[in-house]
Image (tube, rainbow, N blue to C red):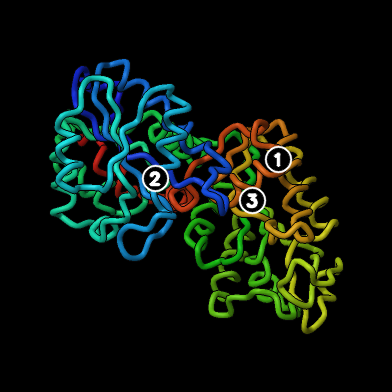
Amino acid sequence: MNLQEIKNIDISGKKVFIRCDFNVPMDEYNNITDDRRIRSALNTIRYCVDNDCSIILASHFGRPKNGYEEKYSLKPIAKRLHTLLKQDIKMAQDVIGEQTLKTASQLKTGEILLLENMRFEAGETKNDKELSKTLASMADIYINDAFGVSHRAHASVEGIAQHFDIEHKAAGFLLAKEIKFFHHIVNEPKRPFVSIVGGSKVSGKLEALHNLVPKVDKIIIGGGMAFTFLKALGYEVGKSLVEDDLIPEAIKIMQQAKELGVKFYLPVDVVAAETFDAEAFAKPTTVQEIPKNWMGLDIGPASAMLFSQALEDAHTILWNGPMGVYEMDKFAKGSAKISHAVASSYATTVVGGGDTADLVRVTGDEDEMTFISTGGGASLELIEGKILPGVKALVIEG
């Protein structure tokens, strides 16, 4: 894939619109608890400052329903950007209001304007043509540096890019790095290549699994999705999360792995509880003996040991999805053990965004990982072999 990159176009002295992904976790007091996504965008922003650009930054945050909501304002983001960049950030009152457009048109060299939450505009998620056109009218150059939303055809991601030719739009440093990394990992991995797939549901990862099986040497399944596979093998899984309609697909995936000689690992024991509750009484049990009215909420100690051993000879590890309900301490042990095993391996380790990125931060393992993606859904779609809508517009034809 021949991606147009920011370093290959002339941005000197231009007005640049950068779509970022500042959708960071915050506590109930609006304090940012993890600013990794903001820090990840700094290389592109600084590059534009160094090239005498005036800069308009755009991002979404959360899922506001009806226009402006104070709790979804980007004001805390502006504050953190000010701290990190050590320069003033102009905070717009809205996205495309009269005053905002005027401020954008009058930006001087080196100045930075942060637009309000893109999703305060109903047209953002609908990829509204008028909104795309108005956003594009603010700048000479469009830069997409928001990997985390590049799988969505939204106005500030895909729509806006249609208003710039290939010499006036490009991928920022973060987006280019993510795309290259995943492309390399999935198509030219060092072997043995082991994929760990977790999370609650098979449905969200079905295509990724079908695409991974022919490419990997081993596949490890954990999290809630493991129970659909276990039930497909005839185990009684109690009240554990199962997608019954996907049992035939699960059988197909296991059959595919068997035919290709891919080692397929499922939990041999789980930590089960009577209710989905942090205070519930929990106990480890083999997968053959899950009590009828109980549910599995984490992999058990034997599974954690088995999976860790399967990782020992790996040269490439791709991990997407936790092994259990890691947000509850009682059901976080399995995920933590796998996190430590991945971190201590000698492999190239790639963590696919979202919950898994949050998990390795909580376990203190993030510095030991080779690469942590900023996008969960986007990284899954890349693994599925799809070209993301936000990236397609930046590919040089021919």
Above or below: residue 330 compared with residue 53: below
Within 10 Å of disc 3 (Cα), the crowding (few <14, some 14-19, many 20+) is many
Q: Is residue 140 left or right of residue 182?
A: left
**Kind of residue indicated by mark 1:** Val
The residue mark sitting in front, 3 or 2, is 2
Q: Amino acid at mark 2?
A: Leu
User: Which of 96 and 201 lies nearest the eye of the viewer?
Assistant: 96
Q: Nearer the viewer, residue 260 or 172?
A: 172
Secondary element type, mark 2: loop
In the image, residue 218 sits, relative to residue 293, either above or below, namely: above
Q: Residue at x 22, y 22 (%)?
A: 11
Q: Nearer the viewer, residue 307 or 66?
A: 66
**Disc 2: which residue:** 74
What label sits on residue 228 in the rendered view? none
Q: CA distance from mark 1 to mark 3?
A: 10 Å
Asked whether the viewer can see residue 253, the reply is yes
What kind of residue is marked 3? Answer: Ile
Q: Which residue is mark 3?
A: 196
Local packing at callout 1 (Cα closer than 10 Å; few below 14, some 14-19, many 20+) is many
Q: Look at the numbered disc 3 and give the secondary structure of its residue.
A: strand
Marks 1/3 in contact by CB < 8 Å: the verdict is yes
The quarter of the rendered structure image containing the N terminus is top left
Among the two numbered marks 3 and 2 on one chain, the one whose residue lies closer to the N terminus: 2
Residue position for label 1 = 342
Quote the CA–CA distance across marks 3 and 2. 34 Å
Placement of the C terminus among the 4 image quadrants: top left
Q: Residue at x 54, y 44 (%)?
A: 31
Image location (x, y in percent) of residue 396: 23, 34
Query: Reading the chain from its start, which is encountered first: label 1 or label 2?
Result: 2
